[in-house]
Image (tube, rainbow, N blue to C red):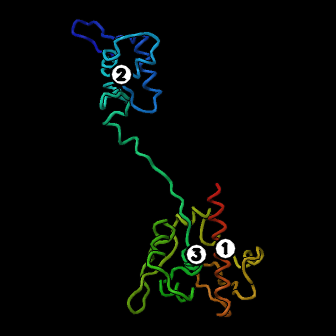
Amino acid sequence: MNKLKKNNVLSFPSKLTESEREIEAIIFAAAEPLSIETIESKLSKKTDVEKSLNKLKDFYSKRGINLISISNKWSFRTAENLSSLMSEQKTVDRKLSKAAIETLAIIVYHQPVTRSEIEEIRGVAFGNNTLEILMELNWVKPAGRKEAPGKPILYGTTDEFLSHFNLQKLSDLPTVTELGSAGLIDTSSVDSSIFGTGKFFKEKQDENKDNIYSDIDEMLSSTLKNDDTK
């Protein structure tokens, strides 16, 4: 920015010469820092490259990018005090394990539910990190404690779960009729009056439990795959 001197004369930055503009362009386009010799070899005419570089260095000293020299090689770098703005953020896609998908399906339709109840429904214990993964995704959260010996933690779904699966509320979850029409479950083994209402899901026949939940797993897995392709 132009500054007003005490004698009221404006001080304008000196314009760059054609050679200085060439040096600026050469360094800007380079994939790596350049030595003075390399810069000289690319200029259209001979000039005092070192002097020009120092002038450019001063010119860029107060800007968002600076011209710097490291081991006698020159390059443009983001100003040090602005480096925090350049931090890179990456989205890492991570596929859920079968155990995590099964656990999510059970929590969705049985919530609030305890860890031991989840394991009883699945018929198998799951790893310590299964619930942690679902909580890291912010799809599942602790939902109080059950009034039972030991007061075990209850788990339920979050608003983020509804958002991810494009649901306004839990009652928007597919009903037994809808899942049956889609061929995902055998409707003869499901009590439709309590399915998807927030009450506990109880099969009429215990031997059909695994098949029912594996079908719900397919529904959730299919939704997750569709999200990956977006």
The residue closer to the viewer here, 3 or 195, is: 3
Give the quadrant of residue 73. top left
In this rendering, is residue 155 above or below 125?
above
Disc 1 designates what residue? 218
CA gap between label 3 and label 2 equals 59 Å
144 or 27: which is nearer to us? 27
Q: Residues within 10 Å of mark 1 (few under 14, many from 20)?
A: some
Circle 2 residue: 36
| Quarter the C terminus occupies | bottom right
Specify the quadrant that holds the N terminus: top left
Report if the CB atoms under discs 1 and 3 are less than 8 Å apart: no
Spatial distance from mark 1 to mark 2, Cα to Cα?
63 Å
Q: Is residue 63 left or right of residue 127?
A: left
Name the spot of residue 59 as percent of width and height, x first: 33, 20
Q: Quadrant of residue 78?
A: top left
Helix, strand, or loop for circle 3?
helix
Figure check: 37 above or below 104: above
Question: Which residue type does callout 1 highlight?
Answer: Glu
